Image (cartoon, helix red, strand yellow):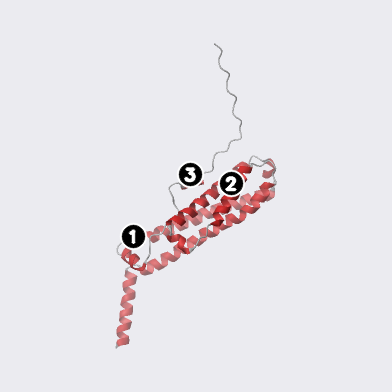
Amino acid sequence: MLRRLATVATLAFATLLAGCGYNDFQRLDEGVKSSWAEVLNQFQRRADLIPNIVATVKGEAAFEQETLTRVIEARAKATAIQVTPETLNNPEAFARFQQVQGELGSALSRLMMVSEQYPSLKANQGFQDLRVQLEGTENRITVARNRYIQAVQAYNVLARSFPSNLTAMVFGYDVKPSLQVANEAAIQTPPTVSFDKPAPAAPAASR
């Protein structure tokens, strides 16, 4: 009799949890973790390409050193950040991660733009192969970011909706940060580089 009552109570509790969104939280939380892992994987792929890109560009004696230094420093900052599962629940750490990755992307964009001014680099097949790999990686980063944003959106809607928000409070399912920041567009827009010499000033008109 007691065993039967325990079974009924267990089933009732499971039904209650399902009705309050507990199972949905489990599913969506795993989806967020999976999509986040893919974001990290693609960022790591980009970081792994940079040493070869830098080594190739260093062979160009007259290459703009400031641009190269910015890439090296940006990569060092990006790879120095230790990303853990807790990063998703730490808004400050998450924002810092986004910032350094955005700075690295901007530095790489500038390097690729400046490299267009060097015919020997444009004729270097090894460098061009690295460029293609980098472009492909940037595209995969965009896809992975979008999937993460969608996964977080679905999760956060559940965490904020009634009555599933009560389940979120009971089991500690906090709202998760998304890969969207106010200054993201500015961070990722490469600066304008011009190699044109300024035109000489017009002579003053004689009186």
In the image, is 95 to the left or to the right of 191? left
Residue at the bottom extreme, as displayed = 1
Using the rendered image of the protein, determine whether residue 165 is visible from the camera's viewpoint. Answer: yes
Residue 89: which numbered mark, if any? none
**C-alpha separation, residue under disc 3 versus residue under disc 2:** 17 Å
Marks 2, 1: nearer the viewer: 2
Q: What amino acid is found at the position of numbered circle 2 in the picture?
A: Arg
Give yes or no for contact between labels 2 and 1 (Cβ–Cβ under 8 Å).
no
Quickly name the residue at label 3.
186
Foreground: 183 or 38? 183
Residue at 51% from the left image edge and 50% from the top image edge? 102
* Above or below, comparing residue 102 to residue 206 in the picture: below
Amino acid type at circle 1 is: Arg
Q: The residue tagged with tag 2: helix, strand or loop? A: helix
Please tell me in which quadrant of the rendered image residue 197 appears. top right
Marked residue nearer the N-terminal end (2 or 1): 2
Q: Left or right: where does residue 57 sit relative to residue 185?
A: right
Q: Residues within 10 Å of mark 3 (few under 14, many from 20)?
A: few
Query: Which x, y percent locates residue 36?
Result: 48, 60
Label 3: element kind: helix
Q: From where the camera sits, is residue 115 visible?
A: no
Q: Quadrant of the N terminus?
A: bottom left
Marks 2/1: CA–CA distance: 41 Å
Q: Which residue carries the number 1 mark?
A: 160
Amino acid type, mark 3 = Ala
Whichever of labels 3 and 2 marks the residue nearer the N terminus, that label is 2
Q: Residue furthest top?
A: 207
Q: Which residue is mark 2?
A: 70
Number of numbered labels in the structure image:
3
Q: Choose top left, top right, bottom left or bottom right for residue 20.
A: bottom left
